[in-house]
Image (tube, rainbow, N blue to C red):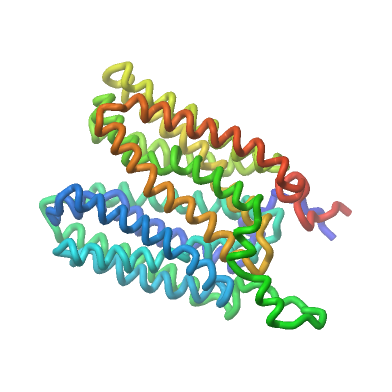
Amino acid sequence: MDDVIPGETRFRDLDPLVRRLFVGFAFSALGSGLTMPFLYVYLAEVRGFATASVGLVFAWMGLLGFLAAPLGGTLIDRFGPKPVMVSGLLVESLATMSIGQVETLAEGYVVASVMVLGTVGLWPAATAMLTRLVPEHAREKVYGLNFMLLNAGLGLGGLISALLISVDDVESFQRLYLVDGATYLVHLAAVVSLPRGTGRAPTRALDGADDTESIAKVGWHVVLRDRTLLRVVGFSIIAITFGYSQMEAGLAAYAVDVAEVPAKALGFAYAANTSAIVFGQLVTLRLIRGRRRSSMLALCAATWSVSWVVIATSAAVDGWVAIGCIVVGLGLFGAGETLWAPVAPAVVNGLAPEEMRGRYNALQGMTWTVGSIVGPATAGMLIGHDLPYVWVGLVVGGTALAAAAFLSLRRHLTDTQDGLVPAGEPVRS
């Protein structure tokens, strides 16, 4: 047989079903990029909702996502990821198209709620499906490629929409939301075209065991007894809260209000972030091959900590130097993201029993909703009350703490779970 080296899986070597999924991801990411940066602008500036009211809508979305996440994980394990993705993409498409028709705050809450319920199981289901379609030694690369496509779509979509929208023209936003909804339908078509049962957990012989007893072994009570998983989730919450979730509210407020960087310069910073991900992901995938996943997560969090230091320096300088600090800092943050994207889901799925991948991925997904609630609220409270340097201390210190915590994780992972010995590693003949 041909020699196969783990980690050197090429795109053309992937299962055709995986490549089909990537096409769907790319289209929906492009659509999200068209609208994601402008939802706040649309609700506050175009529809005229009060800033505080818009903030409550976002907070409600985060809270509802947190409450609904366990249901999404249960449905994935019960029915498989494909039905969850099909229903979620359909709901997401309809809800996104409806955003453009929102005229009252009550309508905003309804549409936002439907959107959250549509998306709550999408990412855990997609991760579970990809995990089951590729061999374990190729998972990190597949997760990384998916993240790269996501960011390429978001970046391109944001660039296009910035050229097309006008806060004085509500129809320009309505057109964007219709296009965004249509991209979800393309993603939906890609998922529907997959063979029936794609991504479902393989059936296992029960060796005469009672079926009821087997089902009893699958549930959230089992997930919540996995102390290693809880450590991963806890450390991830720290990293996301003081890392990812600060990129919009905290970063923008600090850059504009404290460092006095022009708001339009943030576009350069986000472009640097996206470029670092799109052009750096393949390099990172080679870097992490055969290295401890716990160390790579620690390196990611440490990189984020350094990036916040660079961004914080913008308040001590002026003009283009300050802008440069924001741009370089956010680009460095993107370099850290290229470590997080392939490694974090690999750790979680290395811990997950096959029949509970939905629940495990859903629990890890809840770290994002917790971060999206706590992170912006913390930034708003501190920067809004003239305590920007306390905020700097929290984001720098919080991500540094996460780095130390991830290093301690290696004591609780087997070498296989930590990525040193890929399960099922092909042997050279």
Name which quarter of the figure residue 67 lies in: bottom left
Residue at (55%, 36%) from the top-left corner? 402
Taking the spot 32% from the left edge, 49% from the top edge, the residue there is 158
Left or right of 176: which side holds 363?
right
**293 with respect to 318 (left or right):** right
Q: Is residue 108 visible?
A: yes
Residue 124 rendering spot, x and y as whole percentages: 52, 62
* In this view, 319 is above or below 166: above
Image quarter where the C terminus lies is: bottom right
Residue located farthest toward the top when viewing the structure as drawn: 317
Residue 347 spot, x, y in % from top left: 64, 50
| Camera-nearest residue between 304 and 179 | 304
Classify 79 as above or below 411: below
Above or below residue 370? Residue 310 is above
- Image coordinates of residue 242 in percent, x first then y, are 44, 38
Residue shown at the point (54%, 54%) measured from the top left: 364
Residue 274 percent coordinates (x, y): 42, 42
The N terminus: image quadrant: bottom right
Residue 293 found in image quarter: top right
Q: Residue at x 60, y 51 (%)?
A: 230
- Left or right: 120 as drawn, with respect to 131: left
Q: How many marks?
A: 0
Residue 178 in view, yes or no = no
Residue toward you, 381 or 246: 381
